[in-house]
Image (spheres, helix red, strand yellow):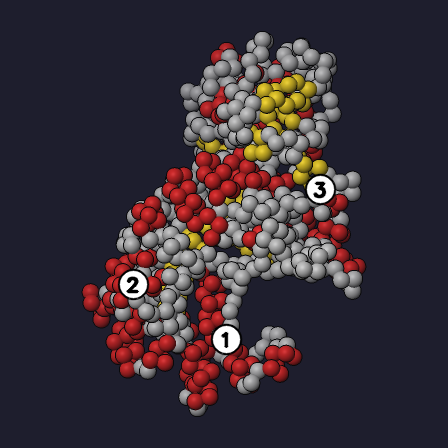
């Protein structure tokens, strides 16, 4: 049955009513329809043959019979079929085919049937455009190499999914005409060198039409990734580098090498979004080019209706410039469907094109203006990035990314106790990055997959000396409170109404409270956004204005459950917690920039100015701070709230030495707890480092807008104080099941105005 009626134009313009009806006929009826007459055969035979392995599964082929059926299909039926009929085969999708041995009738010869048939693909199926063998144990790339040699005049494949192939690919494989029109290529989790493949055949000369490239799990390091980027540059619009060995060193290459240089950042929507301000052509290696977000007087209000309006169409004052010029880049209006780059969607589009003989806009090669070129979808999951590196990428990508994934990054800050060296401890998450995903910065962003802390403000913590349960309590206890104090702004649905799909990863299976509370609050705000968008749609209806859809898909990925067994540390363990957490006798210069092995801010920025007074500043002193101005440097040398900070050439973004005024505060206890702790930390010479613009999160916590602050001093307040780690091992607060709590909330709100009617997914990983 038709879910939606065809348009009047489609219903009246088709020369044959079967053109209109055929797409809605069930697959089980295709064989019989093909036998009616020549006219019916012309409409239904291409549908029956276009994806034979998937069609046979839908028609009832049992998995145990796959190999036997395939051998008959290749050796008997295909050889007797007409050339026209064989040309109808457009896709061989082996991802769910012949994965089991064929029982009593299995033999080595039958198990090799699929690989052997690949040698004859161009001759057997002259119209083949999609080949998917993701994870199939049968594939021998040598067979594809033989087919490639034979494919001198045949039609090229357009989609090739070789992920998880157990054998190494032939380096010169892609030099064949069989692959010259590839649009989608997945060579993930395959043994062998990516560098060798790029130097031999994986390059634009052999693959000029390639737009989507996935190279996950190939042990790609920064140098190899740089080669990939420099080789393809702006040709790709989707690149997946997940589960490799990448670090912050590749960030600038990605931003400059494969993302369009034409920016989507604009001041046109200042009233509702704010605008970016770059006061000087200066920056740092850690931050990138300095810029501030200037807020409008009416911007940032709750559920501001104008914030849900899509961008206006492009207009030109010149009649001869009705379309975009090469140098113009107008950001997407936020209403068009998100481009999909997965194998299933790509196959569906290509097969639909083959059936209807129409050209799809999958690769969008025909869009006007170079402003629409370059990378738009970027996947960086499972690598070794730090939060400062990812933040720099978002800032320097010029608002071009439409889909972005990074499920984890290290966010361990430097610490005031410089002698501390807690090896084996990691903090993962995005504690203060939410403002970077606002439209003013991430102008084209429509879909996001990121660590849950961006929304919950609870990092993932692991420590050799703590059990999983104790680490979870520490994360949801003092670390959560510290992050809320330092970075009050978390990601909310209205942070960017253009985002339609959000996936939060690494969510703990159980929570003591904060994770559940933040997720429930997020769903409640999604419901509020939904109601406000309906109000906006009703208000602006008939005025020529289009309203954004808002958040319509939320996926929550939960980690495997952990054991609440006895903590790894007990009161009798030979660990000196006082020395571990407050080694004041070691002074400040003992290596605080090595805390947790990796810091979230670059080591280049950790070289701070040397102050005349090196008095040890401990957390106990901060707790006893009484009213009155601080007496240590820099407060002892100036009455101003600012000091001049010099950035060396090695730390400068442009390589030039420059100085900026950095805000240090009044030195007197004030109403903002984060500011008070920041001022105390500024007394530490090691923390007067890594200067950068105050972000909206810093401003919300009390820092003055449009000012520079010391990031090292600010970030230091995140880490637990005193004996929080020891206390975490003793706390016995009960855990609640996160998935159960979410389901209970959904049941409570069902049928009420508080119910969010978008698509919510709960998935357990691992």
Secondary structure beneath label 2:
helix
The image position of residue 200, as x and y in percent, is 31, 50
The image position of residue 428, as x and y in percent, is 50, 36
- For marks 2 and 3 on the same chain, the one whose residue lies earlier in the sequence: 2
What quarter of the picture does the N terminus occupy? bottom right
- For marks 3 and 1 on the same chain, the one whose residue lies earlier in the sequence: 3
The image position of residue 166, as x and y in percent, is 29, 54
- The outermost residue toward the left is 108
Q: Is residue 382 above or below residue 695?
A: below
Q: Which mark is residue 148?
A: 2
| Residue 9, visible in the rendered structure | yes
- For marks 1 and 2 on the same chain, the one whose residue lies earlier in the sequence: 2
Residue bearing the label numbered 3: 274
Residue bearing the label numbered 1: 356
Estimate how packed mark 1 is, as few (under 14), some (14 to 19) or many (20 or more) residues with alpha carbons within 10 Å: few
Q: Is residue 76 left or right of residue 544?
A: left
């Amino acid at each position: 049955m038709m879910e939606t009626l065809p348009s009047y134009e489609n219903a009246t313009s088709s020369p044959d009513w079967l053109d209109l009806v055929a797409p809605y006929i069930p697959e089980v009826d295709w064989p019989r329809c093909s036998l009616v007459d020549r006219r019916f055969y012309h409409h239904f035979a291409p549908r029956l043959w276009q994806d034979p392995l998937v069609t046979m599964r839908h028609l009832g082929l049992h998995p145990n019979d796959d190999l036997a059926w395939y051998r008959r299909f290749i050796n008997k039926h295909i050889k007797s079929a007409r050339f026209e009929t064989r040309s109808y085969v457009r896709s061989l999708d082996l991802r769910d085919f012949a994965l089991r041995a064929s029982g009593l009738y299995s033999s080595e010869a039958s198990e090799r049937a699929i690989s052997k048939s690949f040698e004859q693909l161009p001759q057997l199926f002259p119209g083949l455009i999609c080949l998917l063998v993701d994870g199939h144990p049968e594939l021998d790339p040598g067979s594809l190499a033989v087919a490639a040699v034979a494919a001198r005049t045949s039609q090229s494949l357009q989609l090739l999914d070789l992920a998880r192939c157990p054998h190494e690919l032939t380096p010169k494989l892609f030099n064949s005409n069989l692959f010259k029109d590839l649009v989608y290529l997945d060579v993930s989790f395959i043994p062998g060198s990516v560098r060798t493949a790029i130097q031999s055949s994986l390059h634009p000369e052999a693959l000029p039409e390639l737009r989507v490239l996935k190279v996950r799990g190939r042990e790609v390091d920064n140098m190899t990734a740089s080669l990939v980027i420099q080789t393809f540059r702006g040709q790709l619009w989707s690149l997946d580098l997940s589960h490799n060995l990448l670090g912050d060193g590749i960030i600038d290459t990605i931003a400059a090498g494969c993302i369009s240089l034409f920016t989507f950042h604009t001041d046109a929507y200042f009233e509702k979004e704010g605008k970016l301000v770059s006061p000087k052509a200066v920056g740092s290696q850690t931050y990138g080019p300095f810029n501030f977000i200037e807020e409008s007087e009416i911007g940032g209000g709750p559920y501001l209706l104008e914030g849900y309006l899509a961008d206006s169409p492009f207009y030109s004052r010149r009649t001869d410039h009705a379309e975009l010029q090469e140098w113009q880049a107008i950001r997407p209006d936020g209403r068009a469907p998100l481009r999909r780059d997965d194998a299933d969607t790509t196959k569906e589009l290509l097969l639909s094109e083959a059936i209807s003989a129409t050209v799809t806009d999958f690769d969008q090669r025909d869009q006007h203006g170079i402003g629409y070129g370059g990378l738009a979808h970027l996947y960086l999951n499972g690598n070794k990035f730090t939060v400062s590196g990812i933040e720099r990428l978002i800032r320097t990508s010029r608002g071009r990314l439409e889909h972005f994934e990074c499920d984890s990054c290290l966010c361990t800050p430097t610490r005031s106790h410089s002698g501390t060296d807690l090896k084996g401890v990691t903090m993962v998450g995005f504690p203060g990055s939410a403002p970077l995903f606002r439209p003013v910065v991430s102008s084209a962003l429509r879909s996001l997959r990121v660590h849950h802390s961006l929304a919950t403000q609870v990092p993932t913590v692991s420590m050799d000396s703590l059990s999983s349960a104790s680490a979870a309590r520490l994360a949801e206890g003092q670390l959560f409170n510290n992050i809320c104090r330092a970075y009050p702004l978390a990601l909310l649905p209205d942070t960017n109404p253009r985002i339609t799909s959000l996936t939060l990863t690494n969510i703990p299976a159980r929570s003591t409270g904060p994770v559940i509370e933040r997720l429930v609050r997020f769903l409640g705000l999604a419901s509020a956004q939904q109601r406000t968008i309906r109000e906006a749609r009703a208000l602006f209806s008939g005025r020529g204005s289009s309203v954004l859809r808002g958040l319509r898909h939320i996926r929550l990925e939960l980690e495997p459950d952990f054991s609440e067994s006895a903590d790894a540390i007990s009161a009798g363990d030979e660990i000196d917690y006082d020395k571990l957490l407050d080694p004041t006798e070691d002074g400040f210069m003992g290596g605080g920039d090595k805390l947790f092995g990796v810091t979230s801010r670059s080591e280049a920025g950790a070289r701070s100015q040397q102050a005349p007074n090196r008095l040890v500043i401990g957390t106990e002193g901060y707790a006893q701070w009484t009213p009155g101005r601080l007496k240590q440097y820099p407060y002892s040398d100036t009455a101003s709230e600012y000091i001049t900070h010099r950035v060396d050439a090695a730390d400068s973004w442009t390589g030039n030495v420059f100085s900026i005024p950095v805000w240090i505060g009044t030195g007197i206890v004030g109403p903002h707890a984060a500011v008070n702790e920041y001022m105390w930390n500024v007394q530490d010479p090691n923390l007067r480092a890594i200067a950068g613009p105050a972000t909206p999160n810093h401003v919300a916590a009390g820092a003055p807008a449009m000012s520079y602050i010391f990031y090292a001093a600010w970030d230091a307040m995140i880490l637990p104080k005193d004996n929080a780690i020891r206390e975490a091992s003793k706390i016995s607060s009960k855990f609640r099941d996160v998935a159960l709590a979410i389901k209970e909330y959904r049941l409570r709100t069902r049928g009420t105005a508080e119910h969010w009617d978008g698509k919510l997914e709960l998935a357990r990983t691992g």
